[in-house]
Image (spheres, helix red, strand yellow):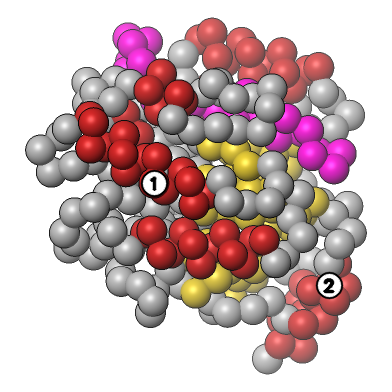
C-alpha cells in the first residue's frame, strides 16, 4: 500500500492517509529539502473537568508530547493555530490567564522560533492585549495579532479574524463565535504585504476557516472569506492556507490554493488520543503532512 501511495504522489495525486506515518519513500525523497514546521491547534487547555469529547486538562500532556517530538525533528519553526486555552468554569480572568501561562510555558519549550494565531476562545474572558502579553512570538512579531515573517525563503502571513461585523475586536466574550470578520484595515495590510513579497512563495495561517466555498458550515468560516480569498488569488505566490477551529479537520482546494484545516488537539483523552503534525513544503510546492496520533497524513501535489 505504501508503494502504491508513493507512486500516486509522484503521478500528481492528492491523497489523505491514515494517521501514522507518510510512506517511507516520500520522507526519504523530500526530507530536509524544503520548509519544515510543526503545527498544533485547538488545545483548549484548562484545569477543568471534561465536557463531551473535550478533555481540557489532558491538553497539558498532549502539548508536552507534541513539543518533545518537534524538538527531535529539526524544524524551522512551530505554530499554534488558535484556541490555545479555554476558560475557567466561572469565567475568572485570573484563573484563565493562569491556564494560558501554563500551556504557553510548554509551547515555549520548543528549541526554535515559535508563533501564535489568535482563536475565538483566546478572548472568551480576557482581551487580545492580555493574551498577547502572556504569550511570546519570535522577536519582531511579539505583541502582534496579525503579522508576517520569513522562513527558509517562504513568506508566512498570520491573520486575525477575531472581530465583530462592526470592526470591534473580540474581548471578554463580546462576540458570537459564528461571526468572525477581518476588518478593512487588515485587508489593506494583507494586500500590501503580498504585493511587497511577490517573489516569495507564501503561506497563510488563520484560526477560522476561509474555504466557505467548500462543504463546511458557513458558521465556521470568516464572514468576509470571499473578499479575503479574492486578495489571495490576485497574488499567485500564495500556495496554501492553514487553519484550525473545525476540530474534525478538513481539506479543500480553490483556484490553485489549498485550504488545510488541522484536527483539534482537545478531542478525546490522552494518551490514547492526540493530534499534531509536521508539515513540509517542498521546493516544487508540494505539501507533505506527517500527522501524529489522530491527525491524518496528507500528500498534496501542487496544482493550478
Horizontal side, residue 294 vs residue 241: left or right:
left
Residue 152, magenta (yes or no):
yes
Q: Which residue is mark 1?
A: 102
Q: Over which residues does the magenta segment extend? A: 147-170
Q: Residues within 10 Å of mark 2 (few under 14, many from 20)?
A: few
Q: Residues within 10 Å of mark 1 (few under 14, many from 20)?
A: some
x, y (%) of residue 2? 71, 87
x, y (%) of residue 89? 13, 43
Label of residue 10 in the image: 2
x, y (%) of residue 39? 58, 53
Eye-nearest disc, 1 or 2: 1
Looking at the rendering, which quadrant does residue 180 occupy? top left
For mark 2, give the secondary structure.
Answer: helix
Q: Residue furthest left?
A: 90
* Residue drawn at the location 23% of the way across and 31% of the way down: 94
Residue nearest the viewer, comparing 276 with 296: 276
In the image, is residue 27 above or below residue 176? below
Amino acid at each position: 500500500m505504501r508503494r502504491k501511495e508513493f507512486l500516486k504522489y509522484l503521478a500528481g495525486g492528492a491523497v489523505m492517509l491514515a494517521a501514522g506515518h507518510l510512506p517511507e519513500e516520500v520522507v526519504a525523497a523530500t526530507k530536509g529539502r524544503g520548509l519544515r514546521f510543526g503545527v498544533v491547534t485547538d488545545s483548549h487547555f484548562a484545569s477543568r473537568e471534561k465536557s463531551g469529547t473535550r478533555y481540557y486538562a489532558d491538553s497539558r500532556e498532549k502539548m508536552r508530547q507534541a513539543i518533545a517530538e518537534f524538538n527531535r525533528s529539526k524544524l524551522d519553526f512551530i505554530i499554534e493555530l488558535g484556541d490555545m486555552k479555554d476558560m475557567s468554569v466561572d469565567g475568572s480572568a485570573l484563573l484563565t490567564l493562569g491556564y494560558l501561562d501554563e500551556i504557553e510555558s510548554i509551547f515555549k519549550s520548543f528549541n526554535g522560533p515559535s508563533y501564535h494565531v489568535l482563536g475565538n476562545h483566546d478572548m472568551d474572558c480576557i482581551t487580545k492585549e492580555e493574551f498577547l502579553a502572556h504569550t511570546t512570538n519570535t522577536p519582531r512579531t511579539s505583541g502582534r495579532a496579525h503579522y508576517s515573517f520569513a522562513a527558509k525563503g517562504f513568506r508566512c502571513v498570520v491573520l486575525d479574524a477575531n472581530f465583530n461585523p462592526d470592526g470591534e475586536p473580540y474581548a471578554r466574550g463580546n462576540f458570537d463565535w459564528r461571526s468572525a470578520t477581518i476588518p478593512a484595515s487588515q485587508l489593506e495590510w494583507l494586500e500590501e504585504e503580498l504585493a511587497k513579497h511577490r517573489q516569495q512563495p507564501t503561506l497563510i495561517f488563520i484560526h477560522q476557516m476561509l474555504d466557505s466555498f467548500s462543504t463546511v458550515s458557513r458558521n465556521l468560516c470568516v464572514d468576509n472569506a470571499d473578499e479575503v480569498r479574492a486578495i489571495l488569488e490576485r497574488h499567485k505566490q500564495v500556495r496554501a492556507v492553514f487553519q484550525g477551529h473545525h476540530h474534525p479537520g478538513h481539506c479543500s482546494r480553490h483556484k490553485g490554493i489549498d485550504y488545510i484545516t488541522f484536527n483539534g488537539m482537545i478531542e478525546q483523552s490522552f494518551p490514547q488520543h492526540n493530534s499534531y503534525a509536521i508539515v513540509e513544503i517542498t521546493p516544487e510546492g508540494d505539501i507533505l503532512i506527517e500527522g501524529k496520533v489522530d491527525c491524518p497524513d496528507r500528500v498534496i501535489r501542487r496544482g493550478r
